[in-house]
Image (cartoon, rainbow, N blue to C red):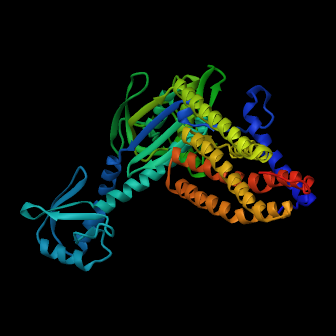
Amino acid sequence: MLNFSKINILLIYLIFFITSIFSFLNLQKNENIIIDKKVNLGLDLQGGSYLLLEINSESLIKEKIQSKVIPIKKLLKDNNLNYSDFKIDKKKLIFKINDFDKLELILFSKKDNLINPYIDQYRSFELDYKKLNDNYVEVSLSKFGILTINNAALKQSIEIVRRRIDDVGTKEPTILQRGEKRILVELPGLKDPERIKKLLGKTAQLNFRLVSENSEFGIDELISEDGETLKISKRIVMSGENLMDAQPSIQNQQNEPVVSFTLDRLGAQKFGRATTDNVGKRLAIILDGKIISAPNINEPITSGNGMISGNFTFQEATDLALLLRSGALPTPLEVVEERTVGPDLGEDSIRSGITSLIVGFILVIFFMFYKYKIFGLIANTALIANLLMLVGILTILEATLTLPGIAGIILTVGMAVDANVLIFERIKEELKTEKSIIHAFDTGYSKAKITVLDANITTLIAAVILFAFGSGPVKGFAITLGIGIITTLFTAYFLARHLTSIIVLKNDRKEIKI
């Protein structure tokens, strides 16, 4: 256990040096960046914004129930069931039927039918029904159907929220699902939470529709940005789904910020055909039900590239381009909870955490030196190396450090010392019976190895479980604790053992007390 080959020694100190050097990158200033890596501070340390968002799936439920009108009518007609007074009432369909018993018999016989004929089979059927007075039947989404819609909308919303926040450039955001309809967003160091709220509060449903007084698809009256009331065709020429890219730019002639967009092949075909057939007419660009621009079509646009103008500031053009690039949210998002952590509170947390770490570190160093003399000094050297390696690995991973993460580092200090205490106490026992000092130290390290490994591996398993099932600060604690266990084992059984072997091999003929 005390013998090291030259290759082993080289590897030990090379690993220590490489990981340790990364810890010092956190001290460099931005203007003198050597390697752009550092430990990021979490929301509780550097301040920032906490938002709890909730999806509003009412419109999706209404659209879903409307999409069932034709299938249900077809089901009734195919089975010769006469119905009347068929209407859509918010989130349900209501119709009158002449033979309710026959309808139930059909529903029970058709296992692949969407409508649920059983009370306890919400997991298998999308729709549910019940009988009302005067042979009226009410069809609505089942609990399973609503849950399916919410899950799909929530997953899509999380992905789009992530795209929008990443485009803003927020460092290390936390975006997590909370329950069936909520999204947790933590944005450390965010200086402009209002801008993020505006970006996340827009669904960004973009479509292009012709300005026309006569349309076979009907007319909507909308008010443009400059207050003009326009009659807009309900027929959608093209939607935002056909957008490949959108970027802010400056229009050369008027020096006006605009959004330049690029369409995919299908979008370019649709746009080219629409502008070719409607030269001289106006094309309304509508975002979330509001007209942002309604330019004249002066000539066919077949290149697949276009421009959106609307008296934007450059910041507004940038945000609009960001929204269009990230895609439309399936449902509106509502802010149900908002908290802002000031940087002063974060500084107090850092100061308290560092003070705790320094005080604990100093006490441990004095105790180990008092208890084990020269070997206590080796243990203290290994402890300092352990902290350097821990911070270095966190820097390499660009991990986010939270207040619980600092607690994990403090715990690592105690566990690192615990490993050396177990080893040295075991060596003490061996020195009482062994005449050979080298053999006593070698046996002590060998016998203590199992105990140290058992203690650290069980803690590592706990850290992995915390990381797998925890969230936010709990994950931060688990990461620092897990990495700390690995660095503890490395420094105790490689670095400290090599330093110990140097002293023991040089004094093998002298009496060594520990």
State the image coordinates of residue 460 (x, y, percent, origin top left).
61, 58
Name, please, the residue furthest toward the left: 134
State the image coordinates of residue 442 (x, y, percent, origin top left).
81, 63
Q: Is residue 261 visible?
A: no
Q: Nearer the viewer, residue 245 or 337?
A: 337
334 left or right, relative to 322: left
Q: How many marks?
A: 0
- Residue found at x 57% / y 30%: 352
- Residue found at x 23% / y 72%: 118
Q: Nearer the viewer, residue 22 or 267?
A: 22
Q: Is residue 220 above or below residue 84?
A: above
52 left or right, relative to 297: left
Q: Is residue 115 above or below residue 479?
A: below
11 left or right, relative to 129: right
Q: Nearer the viewer, residue 339 or 155?
A: 339
Q: Is residue 438 visible?
A: yes
- Quarter of the image for residue 308 reads top right
